[in-house]
Image (cartoon, grey):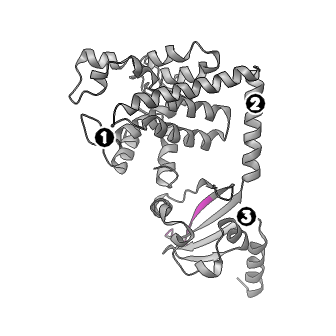
Amino acid sequence: MEKGHDELLRLALAHLHVGVIVVDGSDEVVYVNPAAERIRSVSGADIVGRSVLGCHPSGSHERVRRALQFLRTGKGKPFTRMVTNKEADRHWENTYTPIHDAEGNYAGAAVVSHDITDRRRLEEERSLNAERLQRQVADMSRTFHDLLMASMASLVAALEAKDEYSAGHSLRVAAIASKMAEHRWGFSPQSREVEMAGRVHDIGKVGIRESILGKPDRLTEDEFRHIREHPVLGERILSPVDHLGGIAKLVRHHHERFDGRGYPDGLKGEDVPDGARILAIADTFDAMTTARPYRSAISLEIAVAEVERNLGLQFDPVWGRLFLDLYRSGSLG
């Protein structure tokens, strides 16, 4: 490239409203444009020539390393992560694109950052308006709904608090499921429904004998049949309230399998609601990585491999691949 063209390219990058950071094959920062400096609150003079880890707080270094490894082994596949700066109340979307040389070898990566704060706020506003239009109920009814959901979530939390092995399980499932849903649907009523279903998906266990829930040994056939009733019991608890019908449906079907061998109805493939297919992945992943009375927790990497092995069997392959991408790019886990 001629010298004049090279300068023109640098000027163009400097005037972009999106942030651009380029790292080489050794993960060393080689370029930062002014927009990236503003978005990330960093100085190019301070980080150029240093490891890209210097652009991130120490608490996120493990995820960044995972993302860099994903770029190296992702076969040229870009990926996107949504990032939030809670202190500044700003949101942005980072697109990570691997760069390969003429021989196809990994040479580095480019990170393009878009400030999506205004878009995010608009989505939130549209979501709230959509909820109001869909429900068309009085403020009192809405308040009742929120109080009821809070009560249901508290009931689940109280149930889990009795068992040190399951404490916090529903909140973790809700966090994973909502991240997956938001990645596909944005901040929408559908995503919120999945999150709320995650928080109460095990509410039916209030009807399961405690001696079975905490049993340290293998369950008998009758005990296993009894514990498999909890999705139906959960639906019965939630369905009498009109506003909770969609959530109740997801609770009923969160143990269905993509191959039709799940319960309680043996639904198969796309007959299982999208939200329930999301919950099945989140629920199983958290269960595998959490110690239980009858077994120890397994590592995150082994659990991820188990999810991948069961794509098309236990799990929807499309939602499963999204989960894998979010985990391997550092967005989950």
Helix or strand or loop: what does disc 1 sit on? loop
Pointer 1: residues within 10 angstroms few (<14), some, or many (20+)? some
* Region of the chain picked out in magenta, as a range: 95-105
Residue 269 screen position, x and y as percent: 49, 26
Residue 18: numbered disc: 3
Q: Earlier in the sequence, mark 3 or mark 1?
A: 3
At x 24%, y 23%, the residue is 219
At x 40%, y 40%, the residue is 286
Residue 186: numbered disc: none
- The residues tagged by marks 3 and 1 sit, at their Cα atoms, a distance apart of 44 Å
Q: Amino acid at mark 2?
A: Ala
- As displayed, is residue 172 above or below residue 276? below
- For mark 1, what is the residue? 291
Residue 122 screen position, x and y as percent: 77, 44
The quadrant where residue 136 appears: top right
Helix or strand or loop: what does disc 2 sit on? helix
Residue 119 screen position, x and y as percent: 75, 48
